[in-house]
Amino acid sequence: MGMAATALIAVANLYGPGLQGVFLTTPIPGKFWGIPITFGLGILIMDELRKLIVRTYPKSIIAKMAW
């Protein structure tokens, strides 16, 4: 919930017409969103895979490293 609220505040600051003048920001072009979103999704997928492996094989080396 906190991450969604933070993202919403960031988007409001970047794209809200009233706040752009206050913070002196300009919208980020769409072509620059690809790398951060891909990186974030990669981290999310790797973490979910780690949790799946830990639940499936609780005595594995990955489970021992996770705790």
Image: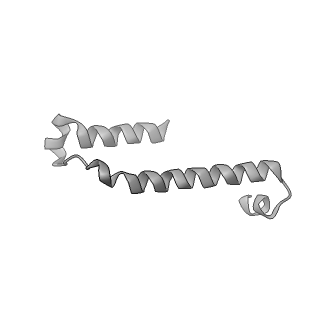
Residue 8: percent from the left, percent from the top? Answer: 36, 37
Q: Which image quadrant for residue 65? A: bottom right
Residue 3: percent from the left, percent from the top? Answer: 46, 42
Which quadrant does the C terminus fall into?
bottom right
Relative horizontal placement of residue 54, taking residue 35 as reference (left or right): right
Picture residue at 32% right of the left edge, 54% below the top: 32
Q: Residue furthest right?
A: 59
35 to 10, vertically: above or below: below
Relative horizontal placement of residue 30, taking residue 57 as reference (left or right): left
Residue nearest the viewer, comparing 13 with 30: 30
Residue nearest the viewer, comparing 62 with 30: 30
Colour logic: one colour
Q: Residue furthest front?
A: 31
Picture residue at 30% right of the left edge, 48% below the top: 30
Picture residue at 39% right of the left edge, 41% below the top: 7
2 to 32, vertically: above or below: above
